[in-house]
Image (tube, helix red, strand yellow):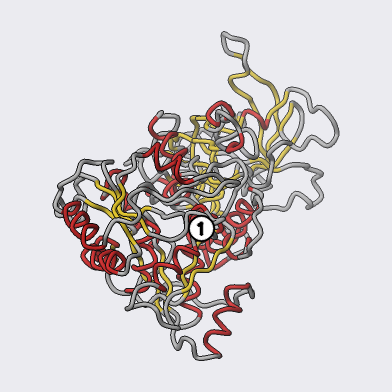
């Protein structure tokens, strides 16, 4: 079911329902499904649903289908289908059998719509969109019956057949359920079941010109696939009544073990928007580089930024499943990836804002090779080769002409510090460029201090990272931050106006030579800088995306 090992899972209300259903023998096997609409890329909210549906099936030795609810071809695309498959597989899950599509069942949907017409429970309505709104009523006022509501069954059957044959224009008519125009639930006031759309479908081509509405197709798809527990988010809570109405009124599905819908709270994450419409807008308005922009909350964006499948599965476990709508703090997501990479990411050194250092008393010979640990707490990860020589790069932020106070633990004139995994050096003098900026720091080094602990009697405070100049590889660093400057951008009248202008800062510097063959998406802890990964769209270029800082600095 999954490529990941089963772990102890917390209790939640959905698991309690499943336990009761199995204990009562209502079901003997659990069958879930993940049913995205292929009208955009999946985001982290979908990752929560993926982990829930596939995770439950795994834990209960059941099955989980991947089904594309593809009933609106005007907004769907094969690009989205392919991206969804890739995201689910990347997260570590395997679906049961082949991917399924609601369009696989179009002929069955049509027959079930005919059954409702024959039972006097559906009719073809010719009200236009504005008239339909007027007849529907309001939350305080009941709706009115359509003048077409009592059309004879035989005539409705003929009209529906004509709809299928392309005999009506788009918007000219729809098929509606006949339920209750006085219902306190708007979704039960004779909802639309079918509409006319002359759109090419990515699976069925031009075979159909009428398409079922999501609420009609979804529940029937579940029933056809023998889904036991249909899990969706709370915004579909009222629609459960229509879900039940459709299945209760179809002969094939009106039975005790038919699917039942259960709702849980959707993921709302700080500093992001989760609306596909708004994510589409960001892409269309070119405010991001695409769906996989590392600032986007899409799974492909998080993947490109350096988030791992394990971290997203862990995040889903941390936030849990409930019926309470809430906003999840960004630091919970960031803690999940830090905890993963702290254990698993190899260490390396990178200088993002380089300042040249010359070791004046170093012999004018070849730089020397030094063995450094790949991971300081995991000897099994081995050693890596770094270099020390006459010319080095340190980060410009690690040097001050005069130490501001006694707690300053970086390099300053007449002050000693240790270079990571290397020697103790002392700053002697500086050189300025034509603009008056420091261009070079001249230092001396103590050749007897390699590998010694700063606490060996030498009172050296501070360790900084460096890269030896002759072996250094030029690299680009993309420092990604939160896309929005406010915690809840969705509440803004113009959410684009609250975008964080510093959500991407690009710097150019140097990395260790051992990264020359680093792989796309490979994570590293650049010591003292944060967690980075090689960009998966960069080709051969040495471009690294910052996944997350070493600690939460937002708002500091």
Quadrant including the N terminus: bottom left
Label 1 crowding class (10 Å Cα cut-off): few <14, some 14-19, many 20+? some
Q: Nearer the viewer, residue 436 or 340?
A: 340
* Residue at 36% over, 38% down: 541
Side of 177 relative to 143 (left or right): left
* Res. 338 image quadrant: bottom right
* Residue at 40% over, 35% down: 283
Side of 368 relative to 171 (left or right): right
* Res. 343 image quadrant: bottom right
| Label 1 sits on residue | 236
Q: Is residue 230 above or below residue 136?
A: below
- The x and y percentages for residue 295 are 50, 40
- The x and y percentages for residue 25 are 50, 91
Q: Nearer the viewer, residue 397 or 309?
A: 309
- The x and y percentages for residue 371 are 54, 54
* Residue at 56% over, 30% down: 499
């Amino acid at each position: 079911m999954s490529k990941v090992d089963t772990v102890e899972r917390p209790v939640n209300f959905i698991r309690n329902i499943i336990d009761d259903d199995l204990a009562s023998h209502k079901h003997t096997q659990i069958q879930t499904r993940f049913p995205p609409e292929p009208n955009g890329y999946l985001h982290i909210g979908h990752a929560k649903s993926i982990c829930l549906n596939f995770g439950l099936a795994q834990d209960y030795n059941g099955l989980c289908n991947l089904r594309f609810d593809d009933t609106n071809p005007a907004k769907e695309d094969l690009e989205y289908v392919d991206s969804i498959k890739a995201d689910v597989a990347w997260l570590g899950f395997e679906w049961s059998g082949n991917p399924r599509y609601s369009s696989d069942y179009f002929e069955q949907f049509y027959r079930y719509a005919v059954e409702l017409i024959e039972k006097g429970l559906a009719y073809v309505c010719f009200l236009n969109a504005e008239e339909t709104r007027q007849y529907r009523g309001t939350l305080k006022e009941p709706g009115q019956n359509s003048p077409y509501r009592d059309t004879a069954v035989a005539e409705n059957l003929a009209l529906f057949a004509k709809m299928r044959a392309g005999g009506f224009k788009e918007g000219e008519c729809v098929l509606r359920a006949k339920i209750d125009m006085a219902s306190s639930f708007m979704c039960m006031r004779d909802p639309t079941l079918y509409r006319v759309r002359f759109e090419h479908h990515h699976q069925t081509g031009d075979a159909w010109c009428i398409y079922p509405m999501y609420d009609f197709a979804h529940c029937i798809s579940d029933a056809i696939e023998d889904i036991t527990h249909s899990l969706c988010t709370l915004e579909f809570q009222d629609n459960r009544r229509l879900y039940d109405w459709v299945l209760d009124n179809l002969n094939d599905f009106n039975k005790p073990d038919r699917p039942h819908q259960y709702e849980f709270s959707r993921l709302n994450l700080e500093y992001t928007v989760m609306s596909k419409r708004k994510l589409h807008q960001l892409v269309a308005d070119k405010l991001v580089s695409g769906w996989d922009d590392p600032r986007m909350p899409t799974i492909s964006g998080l993947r490109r930024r350096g988030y791992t499948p394990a971290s997203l599965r862990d995040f889903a476990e941390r936030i849990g499943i409930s019926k309470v709508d809430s906003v999840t703090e960004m630091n919970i997501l960031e803690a999940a990836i830090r905890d993963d990479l702290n254990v698993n990411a190899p260490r390396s050194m990178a200088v993002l804002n380089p300042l040249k250092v010359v070791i004046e008393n170093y012999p004018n010979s070849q730089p020397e090779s030094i063995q450094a640990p790949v991971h300081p707490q995991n000897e099994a990860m081995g050693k890596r080769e770094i270099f020390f020589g006459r010319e080095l790069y340190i980060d410009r932020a690690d040097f001050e002409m005069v130490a501001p106070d006694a707690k300053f633990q970086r390099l300053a004139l007449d002050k000693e510090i240790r270079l990571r995994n290397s020697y103790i050096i002392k700053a002697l003098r500086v050189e300025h460029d034509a603009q008056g900026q420091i261009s070079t720091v001249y230092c001396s080094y103590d050749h007897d201090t390699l590998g010694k602990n700063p606490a060996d009697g030498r009172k050296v405070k501070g360790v900084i990272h460096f890269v030896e100049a002759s072996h250094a590889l030029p690299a680009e660093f993309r420092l990604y931050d939160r896309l929005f400057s406010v915690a809840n951008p969705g509440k803004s009248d113009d959410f684009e106006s609250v975008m964080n202008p510093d959500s991407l800062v690009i710097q150019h510097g140097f990395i260790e030579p051992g990264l020359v063959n680093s792989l796309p998406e490979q994570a590293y802890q650049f010591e003292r800088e944060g967690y980075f990964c090689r960009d998966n769209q960069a080709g051969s270029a040495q471009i690294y995306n910052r996944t997350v800082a070493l600690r939460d600095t937002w708002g500091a």
